[in-house]
Image: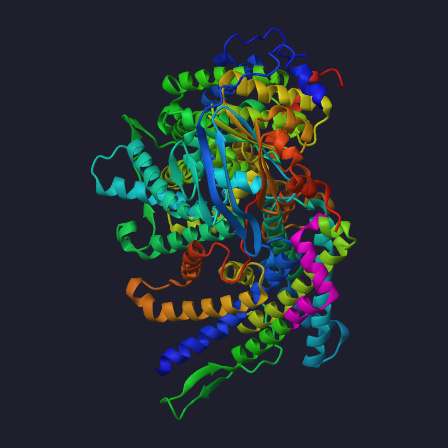
Amino acid sequence: MNTMVESMTMTAPAAPARRIGEVILEVKNISLAFGGVKALTDISFDVREHEIRAIIGPNGAGKSSMLNCINGVYQPQQGSITFRGQTFAHMNSRQVAEMGVARTFQNLALFKGMNVIDNIMSGRNLKMKSNLLQQAIRWGKAEREEMEHRAFVERIIDFLEIQAWRKTPVGRLPYGLQKRVDLGRALAMEPQVLLLDEPMAGMNVEEKQDMCRFVLDVNDEFGTTIVLIEHDMGVVMDISDRVVVLDYGKKIGDGAPDVVRANPDVIAAYLGTTH
Amino acid sequence: MGFFIETTIGGLMSGMLYSLVALGFVLIFKASGVFNFAQGAMVLFAALAMARFAEWFPALLGFDSKLLANLLAFAAALAVMVAVAWLIERLVLGKLVNQEGITLLMATLGITYFLDGFGQTLFGSDIYKIDIGLPKDPLFLLESVFQGGVLVNKEDLFAAAIAAALVIALSIFFQFTGTGRALRAVADDHQAAQSIGIPLSRVWVIVWSVAGFTALVAGIIWGSKLGVQFSLSLLALKALPVVILGGLTSVPGAIIGGLILGVGEKLSEVFLGPHIGGGIEIWFGYVLVLFVLLVRPQGLFGEKIIDRV
Amino acid sequence: MFYRENGQFKTSYRADQQIFPIAQDRIAILALIAVAFVAVPLLADEYLMRAIFIPFLILALAALGLNILVGYCGQISLGTGAFMAVGAYAAYNFTVRIDGMPLIVALLLGGLCAAVVGVLFGIPSLRIKGLYLAVATLAAQFFCDWAFLRIKWFTNDSASGSVNVSNLSVFGWTIDTPYDKYLFCLGVVTVFALLAKNLVRSHVGREWMAIRDMDVAAAVIGIRPVYAKLTAFAVSSFIVGVAGALWGFVHLGAWEPAAFSIDRSFQLLFMIIIGGLGSIMGSFFGAAFIVVLPIFLNQALPALGSLVGLNIGTAFVSHAEFMIFGALIVFFLIVEPHGLARLWSIGKEKLRLWPFPH
């Protein structure tokens, strides 16, 4: 794994200098329960601008639930989320999207009835302003807007190297390509913060290399802050700036990758302990 | 006051009868996750079978006893419903395993149309009588308390009793038997149930047969009350609000929903109707359900749906 | 051999995203329009116009409207008959109570009223999904059935409960022969089909499809389910309302609430299932199929029967219609859930390869 990431960043300086800024997103004392099941208990951590923050932990630790809270899919019973200085007890999905937070999904949540272009175009939705009547007539404003956004989407398609499959219904694509389309849809929102939920799950080594490359490029070129849930330790240790570790809904580690790796609680959670 | 009680009791009775039809819906949904729009058509089909067999057997086999005719007809009609269940499983359900709910709903719509046409082809399209000896005279209760007493229909009373017995039997079946458990597993997830060895097709035949049995009982009672005619099939549309009110997955819910709807309908027709033009029975149930759903989208007793991403 | 895209290069996104990107398709559509506007009125007789073409056009329009709601946005509606009724009665009231109301304005106003009612009954869809929503839409159907029967104001206090309209004219062109009616309907339907297709391929269409496919993910992208669902109800009901007004004004001339009963709702639902959910073209296929089928059965079954020596009465034909309908629905759902439209595109795919097998 180490060699993989090294080979990708061979053209860049050995330690990529990212301009890591101030805290952009902060999660305070979040608790989430479904009936009797406590998904998250009193979680607090922060994310700095332009960094790559990883969230790791064994299965069922509550990582996806955490992202779902940030996105407004779940409403936590307690706690607050602060984004760029504004604090919310509950996030509303649309508000979050408008504020510039985009996300990919663990189980892909692509729109199976549409092709690749349409899926990615749906990410441009917030930026399209023409009203119903203009769209019905199409000629004029709606057409211009559509073409403008199509051009942008084509740049994303080029970036993700999926040109050959633009008109294919996404249901017919292999899993790795579907993951790229998911990423493309999130990128289409021109987000400031990108939440990636296991973007490399189920991929082989080549596909993982490609995905890592895309993630790093997005962070380098556009300065997008990345919050990444991932199981592949090699990837996490290599590309992330800081790591949060969750286990059974509680936070058990937070800091630089090396620090977290040496944390006995983290090791116990992953390998189990002898009693 | 006496009139109010009378109307309420009448409403409870008719509510019980709606519940009978609603039971069939709930059974099938509980066990196979299919919303069976064809339940009304099944009631009609069963009632037609019963009515015609009761006519044909004495003529064919040359005997006179009404009791024997009814028994034979019941047995034959039940056999027919089991056959229908088996055919539906083979030709429709088996081919649509794990499709979305809306596809299955539309399929049952298709079955409705088919059964309507088929039943009338096989059994004829006139109005037929069913007579199983239910007393049709009225009963006057509480004559000492209210002047003239409170009128209760004996036939409805018997129907309510039969419906109650059926519900209790079915609840026991679902909760306490192995087959009942298997049915609930299938309702949850077809593929998962299959993967642990539950024979899907056999389970479905059982369920649809039980629903067919319920349809037969409902058909006999309604047919005895109203005569067996095409409008019986529209009972399904009457029973839908009951099913939704009670929640699609709850047998007691179907009963309570039926009672609420029966009483509500009668009371609103008698006390509210004259003020706004009358004939509000046709939409009262649906509008009531609409408002309930706005507050509780899963019905009164249904299970809450949680969306996962 | 004939249906290849060789040499058809697109040099702009605009060209790539037109409705018919393949030249042969464009030619075919133009030919179809020419046939529809010119050849059909010349060649078809009055009976065909009244029995097949006019009902086909109007029901295709209604099916188009329903397809937007059910096929593109995924919201089940069993109350379409009610929205057609609203369109028809609203247009009627505007015509009868306001002197000199032009026909087209009346139709559009009828559509608008239907859109308002549609949005009203669409509000439950924000909380309720799937089967529960289907039952909720039935509330619309039965309530409207009752309202147009019992509330005398809607029928202008007509004693018989039925209403009629006559003397239709548009910009001085009197519409009284079946040919006039056909051309008028054809014009309306063509315009609406184009507007609908534009809507469906622009961002509101994508919003609808996103809500249909995965509404939680759609919310995360920033799509507002409220806006998407209510616009779907509004646009769908508008089109259905106009179709209802056309049905009453142009096809029937005089009507009662029973013309827009629950049977009509089911009929339209069957049209879009058989024709193809989520396809504009499919709505037309489905409508054609369902309009022609009873007529076909009426002629074919007795003929078949006499071949075999059976005397097939009209009662049996109507029962057979039910049976065949039902069987066909089930057949399509099993074999091709995406309907005739999918079969059509599979056919075109094969045509591209013809005469080669693969």
As rendered, which of C105 and B15 lies closer to the eye? B15
Q: Give the residue at the far bottom of this rendering.
A: B144
Q: Which residues are magenta?
A: B169-191
Residue C129 appears at what percent x and percent y? 50, 48
Q: Is residue A80 above or below residue A121?
A: below
* Above or below, C32 relative to A34: above
Does A96 appear in magenta?
no
Residue C24 position in % (x across, y down): 57, 14
Residue A113: in sight, yes or no?
no
> At which x and y percent is residue A140?
37, 17
Q: Position of residue B30 (x, y in %)?
A: 63, 59
Q: Nearer the viewer, residue C256 or B289?
A: B289
Residue C322 drawn above or below residue B262: above
Q: Is residue C312 visible?
A: yes
Residue depicted at x 36% and y 71%: B270
Q: Which residue lies at the image location 72% right of the left edge and 49% below the top edge?
A: B192
Q: Quadrant of the N terminus of chain B?
A: bottom left
Examine the residues drawn in magenta and state their main secondary structure: helix
Front-most of B259 and C256?
Answer: B259
B111 lies left or right of C234: right
User: Toward which corner of the image does residue B20 lie, by quadrant?
Assistant: bottom right
Name the side, left or right, on which A253 lies relative to B8: right
Quarter assignment of residue B232: bottom right
Which quarter of the rendered picture does the C terminus of chain B lie within?
A: top right
